[in-house]
Amino acid sequence: MDVDFAALGGQIGERIVTVLAGHGKTAGGFARTEGEKIALAIRQIAEMVRDGEILPEEAPLYFDIQMQHSRAVLRTVEGIGLVAAEQAINGTLDLIKGAVTTALGFSLVK
Amino acid sequence: MLPDDLQVRSMWASIRSGVWRHFAAAVLLLFLLPLTTSCSVSLIAPYDSRTEEMVTQIQGELSAFHQELVYDNEAPACVYSKHVDFYRTIHADIANLRVRVSAIAKNLATADQVRALEAGVGDLETIHRNRENQPPGDTRCMGIKAMENSFGGLEGIIRSILQLEMVKQRTL
């Protein structure tokens, strides 16, 4: 196996960062970690084929399980981002309900 | 510069300042207007205890099945046809979970995680089923290392679903 898995992990991470940035998200550190995990999964699967633990034709199925894992992890990050955004907006509303309502003399928020 | 000019300039500056103040207030109100229709904004579904219970149950079934295959790692005990009931049950349980999470508004992230779990379990079933067609002997069983890899991936998906639910529970 003549593959530089560290470099591969970095490349996958960069690709994920590029795609996420295209969607207006910044998850650089996380994406790089996920890229490294995918590279590690490729390495483990390649080693299992080499050692006869799995058949070459089974490799895509094992890899797909790891990709589904990455998909689920990315969805968690997306959800955490939404929770954070929701908290930020509702924190703003709380501020408006308090100080801004007092300053204006009428309520903007029901 | 004449004193009158100064007064005019000062007056204009005052008017401009007033106009800008009102303009800024109008922009602020335009921004705030959509927020006035409710007292809070919801971007993601709230925590659902039933989802957590169902996911935890599925994790229990997967762990038990993994250990069963580790302890009975010899043909014919390990082969797919001896374990069809497990796949039938877990597919049904994941389908139930999918229906529930899809019925909850703004729950797209969790719904997609459940679809990832469904796809992953489908991959495991295909591997297991195809193994049975191998020549008689231990190669008809999934290897211990291979199972660690596949079950580890599935457990990772379940962990991600639970992590998101726990974040919702703590913060929403």
Image (cartoon, coloured by chain):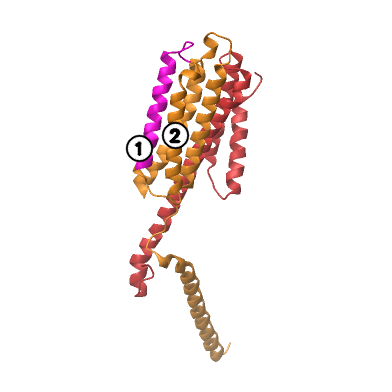
Residue found at x 52% / y 39%: A29
| Residue position marked by numbered label 2 in the rendering | B92
| Residue B76 on the magenta span | yes
Single out the residue that lies furthest toward the top: B137
Tag 2's secondary structure? helix
Instruction: In this rendered view, identify the residue nearer to me: B128 or B35.
Output: B128
Instruction: In this rendered view, identify the residue nearer to me: B82 or B44.
Output: B82
Single out the residue that lies furthest toward the right: A2
Tag 1's secondary structure? helix
Q: Which chain carries label 2?
A: B
| Residue position marked by numbered label 1 in the rendering | B53
> Which chain identifier belongs to the red chain?
A
Crowding around mark 1 (Cα neighbors within 10 Å: few <14, some 14 to 19, many 20+) is few
| Residue extent of the magenta highlight | B50-78
Q: Does residue B155 show up?
A: no
Instruction: In this rendered view, identify the residue nearer to me: A59 or B133.
Output: B133
What's the CA distance linking mark 1 and mark 2? 15 Å
Amino acid carrying label 2: it is Ala
Amino acid carrying label 1: it is Glu
A103 horizontally vs A43: left or right: left
Q: Nearer the viewer, mark 1 or mark 2?
A: 2
> Which chain identifier belongs to the orange chain?
B
| Residue B168 on the magenta span | no
Q: Is residue B149 above or below residue B37?
A: above
